[in-house]
Image: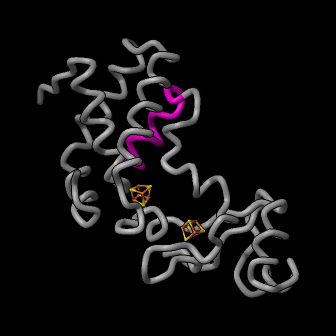
């Protein structure tokens, strides 16, 4: 697996190749089969990977909470939702709430998240490779592969499964 510190530089070198692979998948992959392939790789690779030793996603992005997430998160901090919002969040245009800073304010030194089990689905599901309709999200997948070493590895394995060979022009 590529080191979290090296992933951005390596993915930048592979950017054209990965976008060419995206185009290839769009025209060659069966959407349901591709979802199954992503799900299998997601389960297999994340089972063996310690995300707390990476946390590139929490450093590059920040937590995004819905209104429904607020009571549970606030309670785990011993605060009311209003107090929690005022101290930790700002409201986005779509009426969700982001942590104020990036890297995320809830990221701790040891790689754990201060929100614990209350972390929002948008964090827990990253890089979304266990979700359906991956064929419609391949742009995001290529973008996230420059952040997430596990997703980068998934793409490399998928290239082999599809017999995809990149030829520079
Ligand atoms: S999901 Fe990916 S980017 Fe986030 S911590 Fe795990 S390996 Fe790193
Ligand atoms: S809320 Fe937690 S899991 Fe989500 S980005 Fe912040 S530290 Fe990471």
Residue 169 appears in the rendering: no
Query: Relative to 8, is 152 above or below?
Result: above
What residue lies at 74% left-to-right and 87% top-to-bottom?
A: 87
In the image, is residue 29 above or below residue 153?
A: above
Quadrant into which the C terminus falls = top left
> Is residue 139 located in the magenta-colored stretch of the structure?
yes
| Image position, residue 116 (x, y; %) | 62, 70
Give the quarter the ligand 1 occupies. bottom left
Q: Is 165 displayed left or right of 89 in the figure? A: left
Q: Is residue 54 visible?
A: yes
Q: Residue at x 47, y 32 (%)?
A: 39
Q: Is residue 135 left or right of residue 24?
A: right
Give how far across and how far down residue 96 sits, in percent: 76, 61
Q: For the stretch drawn in magenta, what is the main secondary structure? A: helix
Picture layout, residue 33 above or below residue 111: above
For the view shown, which residue lies furthest in the left direction?
168
Q: Residue at x 31, y 52 (%)?
A: 149
In the rendered structure, which segment of residues is drawn in magenta? Answer: 134-145
Q: Residue at x 45, y 66 (%)?
A: 60
> In x, y percent, where is residue 33?
46, 16
Q: Which of these two is toward me, 81 or 95?
A: 81
Q: Position of residue 158 (x, y in %)?
A: 30, 28
């Amino acid at each position: 697996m590529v080191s979290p510190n090296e992933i951005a530089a390596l993915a930048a070198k592979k950017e054209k190749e990965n976008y060419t692979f995206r185009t290839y998948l769009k025209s060659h992959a069966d959407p349901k089969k591709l979802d199954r392939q992503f799900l299998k790789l997601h389960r297999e690779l994340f089972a063996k990977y310690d995300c707390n030793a990476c946390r590139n996603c929490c450093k590059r992005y920040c937590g995004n909470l819905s209104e429904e997430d607020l009571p549970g998160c606030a309670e785990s901090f011993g605060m009311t939702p209003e107090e929690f919002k005022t101290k930790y969040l700002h409201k986005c245009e779509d009426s969700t709430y982001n942590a104020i800073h990036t890297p995320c304010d809830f990221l701790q030194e040891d790689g754990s998240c201060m929100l614990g089990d209350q972390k929002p689905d948008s964090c827990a599901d990253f890089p979304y490779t266990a979700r359906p309709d991956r064929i419609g999200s391949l742009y995001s997948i290529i973008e996230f592969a420059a952040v997430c070493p596990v997703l980068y590895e998934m793409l490399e394995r998928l290239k082999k499964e599809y017999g995809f060979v990149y030829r520079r022009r």
